[in-house]
Image (spheres, rainbow, N blue to C red):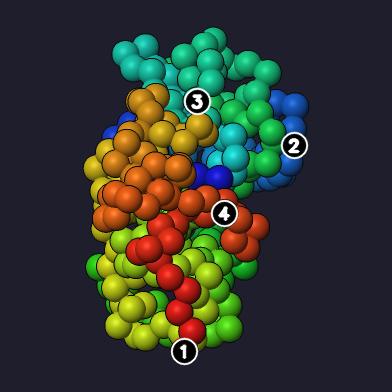
Amino acid sequence: MPELPEVETVRRGLQELLPGREVREVRVYDSPKSFPNDPVQVRQFLYGARIQAVRRRAKVLMIDLENNYSLVIHLKMTGQLIFRAQSAQFGGGHPNDSLVGQLPDRSTRVEIMFQDGSQLFFNDQRKFGWVKLLPTPEIAHLSFMRRVGPEPLDPQTTADQFIARARRHQKAMIKPTLLDQSVLAGVGNIYADEALWAAKIHPQTRVQALTDQQLAELLREVCRVLQLSLRHGGSTDKNYVDAEGRKGNYLAFAQVFRRQDQPCYRHPDQLIVKQKIAGRGTHICPVCQVVRDR
């Protein structure tokens, strides 16, 4: 599953490409669940509509139209958004040959054609992702959107908000709490491990054993590692690349993630350990990160 930096990197690229383009036609291939809207509704509200902006909430992309409708897109595990024009070729998502090959191909689920001849393809090998056309005001009322927590990189997100949401899970371990999208939006396994190491918190520590000061510091580290990843185009994890098809290189700067059996940067005589916590592969330094009990 992509995390916030990977999806945000794709959003930033598409924001440079799509606004102002007018939809001419839409084709749905093979998998109706990839684009479940009624064809009559699609022709009425999507054909002829002009793209206004590309937004993101948590791990979901939204392509806003000038007619107050939006395309809501979730890439899931293997989704791709690929833009093709005579003068440019761009792709973001799962890095396979579809990013540079002839389209549509067997993984293409939706093709959006624009009046200027350019195209946007939604590809998805495993068919878990989807595209939905919705009235823009309704998006905020979707069950997912109502549940999702604050954006960590939003300047209006405060430590107090994060602490209050984390405290709803007092008896839970901090790592699954951090991965809970209702606590904080967009954080996944890579950046949870990185932030917990930076904050010197063991992933199995119960929330109730952490002080408000420690939780505030954890939020600061989450924001720091997310910003660092954005500067480097996201991670090089095998599923996601940016809007120009370039792989991110954050993992070259990772402190613990996928560094098992390598020395800790704070304690060179101690090797990073990988273990399963709450069902997720987790990377820790046994010296830096010790389970605390209140």
- Label 2: which residue? 32
Residue drawn at 41 percent across, 34 percent down: 236
Between discs 4 and 3, the one toward the N terminus: 3
Q: Is residue 149 above or below residue 272?
A: below
**Mark sitting on residue 95:** 3
The secondary structure type at the circle numbered 1 is loop
**Residue 275, percent from left and from top:** 57, 54
- Label 1: which residue? 294
- Label 4: which residue? 275
Out of 14 and 211, give the one closest to the viewer: 211
Between discs 3 and 2, the one toward the N terminus: 2
> Is disc 1 surrounded by few (<14), some (14 to 19) or many (20+) residues within 10 Å?
few
Give the quarter of the image for residue 195: bottom left
The secondary structure type at the circle numbered 3 is loop
Residue drawn at 63 percent across, 43 percent down: 130
Residue 61 appears in the rendering: no
Camera-nearest label, 2 or 1: 1
For the N terminus, the quadrant is top right
Between discs 3 and 1, the one toward the N terminus: 3
Q: CA distance from mark 3 to mark 1?
A: 45 Å
